[in-house]
């Protein structure tokens, strides 16, 4: 049976949610394995593509969370594949669908449900993937939440990611005290038995962490991690941000960027999620692709940004904040004194017209700066860093790049990648290995 809004099973949805579903929601043409008999305070959505062996472990770790909190959450697995899926992916997905009822009983997950987006006629379109799978689960979850009790929670997890027994409690506690609509959850990748693979995942995680620290030192409001298996939000924030996008990769980056623009993102504390360290060729970029590239071609393929690029970002952000009364041409002249690449990038990005429009619509300085950061967002920041790296400051080995950023943050830098990663994990709330 398909549950759709206004079916009469539950109270009507808030108007904003109904409007979102009508305008942006996925059509409810896929079947939930059964209709829940009650509504929930939150949902944990897990896309799963050929993950039978890994999903088993993910559900096991979820089941170790306190029953009193598990009872309040629906766990919704979206078993998915594209129409061009391989025979092995199709076979594995069929096995997942076959095993889910058994896992539901075995782990006592009475609120475990699933969506079949894998069998013939129900697959995702070609060139679609994890973004659409997440969206299916999140959009469907909206219709199963109890809005009468407050603002429910939506949590994103992956089928190859392990969580701790304090996972759900930390999420609930965070949103009980945070005013932001979204949350980035601390993470640390699982350990590899293979030393070469372990070295690759450490290098990649260090790359992610030093990037966030560099943005923090630059004063960017986007200095938080965007990992798909480690993010959550209020249902209202999900709706106001326009919901999950359908990107094949990078859906997490763009989703949290939009949530931050509309309702804010804060870093959660009190738990850690543990994504898989494995390589993968399913997506054009991301953890799995980066690890696979390093294993195939050597670690030198992943070089790090020079610290100066973060300094340039910081100088630009500070210059705008200190000179917000200036017109666009004056700000562009100031940008040219910071970096010619910065100036050219802003010109090509349409800064002049954008700034005029921002000034026209924002009378107060705080609103103007908020609108500016909405324009000069995480994506434009990343594009500028790429431009600076491609034209003036080529990427370098991590040992040098990382130590300089760490020292600018006021810490003594270790010498090795492993020790540098351990330090950044501690600084960014991911120092515990408990599972």
Image (cartoon, grey):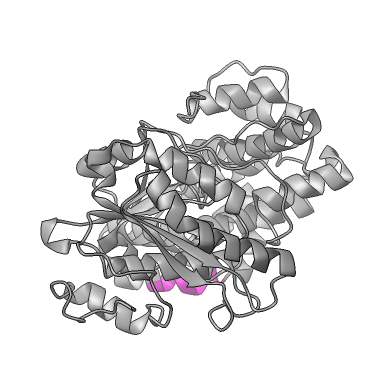
Above or below: residue 246 compared with residue 212: below
Say whether residue 29 is magenta: no
Q: Which residue sits furthest right?
A: 297
Residue at 53% across, 37% down = 274
Using the image as rendered, state which of residue 166 and residue 227 is in the foreground.
Answer: 166
Using the image as rendered, state which of residue 152 and residue 360 is in the foreground.
Answer: 152
On the rendered image, what quadrant is the N terminus found in?
bottom left
Using the image as rendered, state which of residue 328 and residue 263 is in the foreground.
Answer: 263
Q: Quadrant of residue 151?
A: bottom left
Q: Position of residue 209 (x, y in %)?
A: 58, 37
Residue 156 in the figure: left or right of residue 344: left
Q: Position of residue 327 (x, y in %)?
A: 44, 65
Residue at 22% across, 54% down = 41
Residue at 40% across, 43% down = 107
Does any portion of residue 122 appear in the rendered image? yes
Residue 370 in the figure: left or right of residue 202: left
Residue at 25% across, 73% down = 17
State which region is magenta.
Answer: 350-357
Does the magenta stretch mainly form a helix, a strand or a loop? Answer: helix
Q: Position of residue 361 (x, y in %)?
A: 31, 72
Does any portion of residue 244 appear in the rendered image? no
Using the image as rendered, state which of residue 382 and residue 136 is in the foreground.
Answer: 136
Above or below: residue 341 compared with residue 129: above
Q: Position of residue 201 (x, y in %)?
A: 69, 37
């Amino acid at each position: 049976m398909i549950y759709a809004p206004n079916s009469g099973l539950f109270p009507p949805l808030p108007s904003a949610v109904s409007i979102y579903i009508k305008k942006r929601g996925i059509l409810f043409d896929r079947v939930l394995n059964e209709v829940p008999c009650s509504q929930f305070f939150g949902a944990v959505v897990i896309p799963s593509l050929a993950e039978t062996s890994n999903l088993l472990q993910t559900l096991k770790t979820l089941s170790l969370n306190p029953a009193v909190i598990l009872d309040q959450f629906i766990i919704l697995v979206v078993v998915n594949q594209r129409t061009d899926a391989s025979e092995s992916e199709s076979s594995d997905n069929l096995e997942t669908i076959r095993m889910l009822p058994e896992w539901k009983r075995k782990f006592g997950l009475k609120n475990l449900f699933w969506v079949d987006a894998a069998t013939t006629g129900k697959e995702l379109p070609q060139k679609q993937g994890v973004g659409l799978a997440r969206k299916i689960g999140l959009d469907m979850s909206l219709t199963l939440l109890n809005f009468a009790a407050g603002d429910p929670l939506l949590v994103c997890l992956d089928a190859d990611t392990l969580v701790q027994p304090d996972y759900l409690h930390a999420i609930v506690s965070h949103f009980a005290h945070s005013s932001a609509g979204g949350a980035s959850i601390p993470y640390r990748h699982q350990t590899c038995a293979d030393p070469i693979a372990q070295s690759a995942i450490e290098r990649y995680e260090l790359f992610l962490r030093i990037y966030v620290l560099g943005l923090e030192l630059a004063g960017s409001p986007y200095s938080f991690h965007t990992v798909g298996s480690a993010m959550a939000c209020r249902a209202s924030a999900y709706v106001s941000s326009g919901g999950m996008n359908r990107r094949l990769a990078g859906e997490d980056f763009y989703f949290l960027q939009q949530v931050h623009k509309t309702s804010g993102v804060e870093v959660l504390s009190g738990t850690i999620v543990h994504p898989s360290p494995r390589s993968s060729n399913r997506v054009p970029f991301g953890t799995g692709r980066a690890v696979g590239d390093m294993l195939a071609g050597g670690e030198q393929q992943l070089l790090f940004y020079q610290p100066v690029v973060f300094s340039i970002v910081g100088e630009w952000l500070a210059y705008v904040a200190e000179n917000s009364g200036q017109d666009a041409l004056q700000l562009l002249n100031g940008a040219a004194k910071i970096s010619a690449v910065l100036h050219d990038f802003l010109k090509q990005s349409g800064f002049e017209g954008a700034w005029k429009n921002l000034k026209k619509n924002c009378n107060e300085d705080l609103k103007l700066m908020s609108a500016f950061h909405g324009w000069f967002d995480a994506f434009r920041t990343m594009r500028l860093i790429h431009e600076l790296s491609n034209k003036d400051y080529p990427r370098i080995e991590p040992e040098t790049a990382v130590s300089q950023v760490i020292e600018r943050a006021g810490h003594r830098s270790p010498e090795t990648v492993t020790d540098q990663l351990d330090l950044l994990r501690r600084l960014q709330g991911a120092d515990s290995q408990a599972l």
